[in-house]
Image (tube, rainbow, N blue to C red):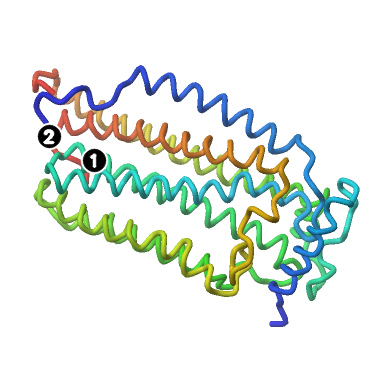
Amino acid sequence: MDNTPPVVNVRRYTVIRNIILVWVTVVLFAAFLLNIPKINILEHTARNLYFHVPMWFTMMAAVFVSAYHSFQVLRSGDLVRDIRALQAARVGAFFGILGLVTGIVWSKFTWYVGTDVWWNFDPRQSMVSLQLLIYGAYFVLRGALDDPSKRARIAAVYNLFAATTTPFLLYVIPRQMESLHPGAEGNPAFSEITHPIMRLVFYPAIIGFIGLFWVMYTQRVRTALLKYRVTHDPEL
Amino acid sequence: MALSPFIAQEVAQEAQDQATQATAYDSVWAGDAVPTQALSGMEQVMLSNDKLYVVLAVVLIIWIGIVILLLRNDNRLKSVERTMEERGTSFDDGL
């Protein structure tokens, strides 16, 4: 940890944060104001494409960030990397939960209208819940280990495992099964069925939410780092 | 349960093919293809205005999530500040 350059570049953070906040605001306006094609069952809820789907892209990005820093922990044993891996995983799981809940609401008022169903064991929902449990175990595992450097290494190994399962549980397995989600059973996932006007908002929305992740993640890293400097005791 | 979301999905995809010709926001009642009970009060609200309130609910969920995270960050910062005050900490650890 000695002689490292400042761990968080606050000026860069501030600039990017401001850009992201304006960016997301514009995306929000575009998401509601642009006319979209009318689709039976979906109607206006097609706009959830701009909100629900980016949650998963963001979680995936968070998983990459977390795994990268866990890998660096194993290489260098640097506890700052451990702090980064933990915070990325936490904010990533947070976006995962948001994605799950928004998905439940969306399906309830479209495909499950007129039924009492909120949860129908759609493969993607089930796999994603499993994925969140795997990350839950990561947080619990950290709590079980007292020695910071040992904790950092063991948690890093587990985190790499968790990151490895993510693409399979989120993308590979659900596409093999019957699902409400596009892309199931070899159907076109996105490219053929999405109107250009929706892409115009969708891609910026992904960038916006990943940016939002980065802002929140950086805030938490800064705080966790401050705590570490004050107490010399890295967070569980 | 006589639920058939997969049929519903096919209907949705067929409708997508016609979507380019459809006028914007003509109101097709969404429950048509799905076996239905009487709509609950909540559903009546959520399905009105071409289901726009579903989008509102989703955006609000995300917003509430962000607010919770924000408050948690705040508490965390507060606890560090408290520790610093208690200890009269000054940074001399060279970090």
**Does residue B84 appear to the left or right of B12 in the view shown?**
left
For the point 74% across and 66% down, which residue is it? Answer: A113
The amino acid at mark 2 is: His
Q: Residue furthest front?
A: A192
Task: Please name the residue shown 41% across and 64% down the image.
Answer: A168
Q: Which residue is mark 2?
A: A232
Instruction: Depth check: give the residue in front, A44 or B65.
Output: A44
Whether residue A47 is situated above or below residue A112 in the rendered picture: above
User: Could you tell me which residue is drawn at 12 percent across and 43 percent down?
Assistant: A77
User: What is the three-letter code of the residue carrying label 1?
Assistant: Ile
Q: Chain of mark 1?
A: A
Q: Nearer the viewer, residue A108 or A81?
A: A81
Is the same chain shared between marks 1 and 2? Answer: yes
Q: Is residue A110 left or right of residue B90?
A: right
Q: Quadrant of the N terminus of chain A?
A: top left
Q: Position of residue A32 (x, y in %)?
A: 72, 37
Secondary structure under the numbered disc 1 in the rendered image: helix
- Mark 1 or mark 2, earlier in chain: 1
> Based on the displayed image, in which of its 4 quarters is residue B14 positioned?
bottom right
Q: Is disc 2 placed on a helix, strand or loop?
A: loop
Are discs 1 and 2 less than 8 Å apart at CB?
no
Q: Which mark is residue A55?
A: none
**Which percent across, then down, holds residue A20?**
51, 27
**Rendered position, A161 above or below B84:** below
> Mark 2 Cα within 10 Å, few/some/many (few <14, many 20+)?
few
Query: Disc number at residue A83?
Result: 1
Q: Chain of mark 2?
A: A
